[in-house]
């Protein structure tokens, strides 16, 4: 154990970030604009305001301001569970016999069990400030839905959640936490919306996808007075709010006099990965420092590693704006695996641009190897990780073992985005030897690519 490096490093309240960091301001190549699905022209603030809250639209379109003030009410809420600890994984290092120094930023120490609350409270705040009655959303693994239900309860807003059907069935307790906080939870696709009925007619018995759930949530938001739609990942505004993760990490490392060499995050739509790497990526973009960034996605839904960089619909029902991103096609329905929230067909436009500019790497991993890493981490470090987080753990272990082979003393940081206590069905299948790996064939992916719009 390094005498000068504690197991956990916390910031003082006075050291917590007062502003979010907007990485787009430092990007030479900005993310491509959202397009109107009908006209194929860039979406205006007025058009986006039909779906999203006004202040969030401004954040979504802001490519110039590097820092945006965090309202005091949000800062006060953050203090309930932030700052989150930067943890030195001494036990894991010892078990692996690696010269690498491993750190993780733990975001699971709140009732929602994940990093999602960082953006949920911000989006609920702006909805309340606008005078709205409520919001609609989708959720995959249930972390975002849980976080948003908590945030809406805090501000007295109604919350309507469309939960991907496979998760709705696998995670009844996650569903009940949402209901306890006052949210209504509907399995998606459902018979309660026009787009849900259409998807069910075309794909009978489907287990659903985030793309399906987004379509339903948007339909209800647009068709209900006093409501707007909010999203837990993918959007620029969400990466902005999640930058508190990376900002706190950066301040903690500076206090320790340490600099990470490799920064690893799991990647579904991009919220936690973008939040973790943004302040460090800013240094790289400005030429102040260099880091190696690794996005880790499931082999069953490999948008970065096997997707196409193209404009695509953000939802299966094709009612949302078009986003230029690495995508598997809005019609791609991932297998009913246990990657939870990492089942979105596309990737954040900001992260897609950074990946296309070769500023970060991406790898895909199979779920049995992910759960092997999760089990190892739980037994050694004492935290039961969420399946999503375990993708980052898998690659962090792999990189640490490479250091063992080469003798390099690399410093590794990964995002431990949440806990896995609502994911015990998945752990049970792994423990019983019933978990299998699914990797889509080129033919499977071709079906999704065939639906890409012409832009």
Image (tube, helix red, strand yellow):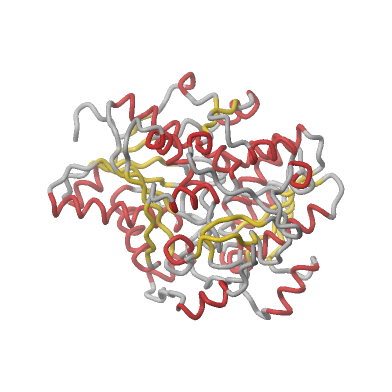
Left or right, 442 with reference to 258 = right
Q: How many numbered discs, if any?
A: 0
Which residue is nearer to you in this view: 165 or 378? 165
Residue 116: x and y in percent read 56, 45
Against 354, is 443 above or below?
below
Residue 383 appears at what percent x and percent y? 38, 48
- Residue in the picture at 61% in, 45% down: 147
Check the image and report above or below for 358 versus 207. above
Residue 409: quarter of image: top left
* Residue 137 relative to residue 406: left or right: right
The quarter of the picture where the N terminus appears is top left
Q: In this view, does 387 lie to the left or right of 52?
A: left
Q: Nearer the viewer, residue 65 or 315?
A: 65
* Near-viewer residue (244 or 424): 244
Q: Nearer the viewer, residue 164 or 39?
A: 39
In the displayed orientation, state which residue is furthest to the top: 14
Picture quarter containing residue 248? top left
Q: At x 63% / y 23%, what residue is drawn? A: 72
How far across and down, in percent of the image, does residue 146 sit? 62, 49
Residue at image x 40%, y 40%?
105
**Quadrant in which the C terminus is drawn:** bottom right
- Residue found at the very far right of the displayed protein: 225
- Residue 82 in percent (x, y) is at 50, 32
């Amino acid at each position: 154990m390094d005498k000068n490096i504690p197991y956990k490093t916390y910031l003082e309240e006075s050291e917590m970030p007062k502003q979010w960091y907007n990485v787009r301001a430092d990007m030479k190549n900005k993310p491509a604009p959202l397009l109107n699905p009908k006209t194929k022209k860039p979406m205006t603030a007025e058009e986006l305001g039909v779906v999203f809250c006004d202040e969030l639209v401004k954040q979504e379109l802001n490519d110039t301001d590097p820092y945006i003030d965090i309202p005091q009410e949000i800062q006060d809420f953050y203090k309930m569970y932030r700052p989150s600890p930067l943890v030195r994984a001494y036990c894991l290092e010892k078990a692996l016999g690696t010269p690498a120094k491993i750190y993780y930023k733990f975001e699971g120490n709140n009732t929602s069990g994940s990093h999602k609350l960082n953006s949920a409270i911000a989006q609920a705040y702006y909805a309340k400030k606008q005078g709205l009655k409520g919001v609609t959303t989708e959720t995959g693994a249930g972390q975002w839905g849980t976080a948003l239900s908590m945030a809406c309860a805090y501000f007295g807003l109604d919350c309507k959640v469309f939960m991907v059907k496979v998760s709705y069935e696998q995670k009844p307790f996650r569903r009940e936490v949402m209901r306890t906080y006052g949210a209504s939870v509907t399995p998606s696709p459902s018979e309660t919306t026009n787009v849900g009925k259409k998807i069910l007619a075309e794909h009978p018995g489907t287990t659903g996808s985030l793309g399906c759930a987004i379509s339903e949530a948007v339909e209800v938001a647009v068709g209900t007075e006093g409501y707007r739609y909010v999203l837990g990942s993918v959007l620029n505004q969400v990466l902005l709010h999640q930058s508190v993760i990376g900002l706190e990490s950066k301040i903690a490392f500076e206090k320790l006099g340490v600099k990470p060499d490799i920064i690893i995050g799991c990647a579904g739509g991009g919220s936690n990965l973008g939040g973790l790497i943004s302040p460090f990526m800013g240094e790289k973009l400005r030429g102040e420092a260099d880091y190696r960034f690794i996005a880790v996605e499931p082999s069953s839904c490999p948008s970065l590693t096997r997707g196409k960089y193209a404009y695509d619909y953000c939802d299966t029902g094709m009612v949302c704006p078009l986003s230029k991103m690495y995508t598997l096609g809005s019609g791609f329905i991932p297998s009913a695996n246990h990657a939870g929230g990492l089942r979105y067909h596309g990737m954040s436009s900001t992260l897609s641009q950074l990946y296309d500019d070769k500023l970060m790497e991406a790898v895909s991993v199979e779920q049995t190897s992910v759960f092997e890493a999760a089990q190892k981490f739980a037994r050694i470090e004492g935290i039961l990780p969420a399946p999503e987080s375990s993708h980052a753990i898998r690659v962090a272990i792999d990189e640490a073992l490479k250091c063992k082979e080469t003798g390099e003393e690399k410093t590794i940081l990964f995002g431990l985005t949440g806990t896995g206590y609502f994911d015990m069905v998945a752990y049970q299948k792994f423990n019983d030897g019933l978990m299998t790996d699914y990797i889509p064939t080129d033919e499977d992916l071709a079906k999704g690519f065939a639906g890409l719009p012409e832009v």
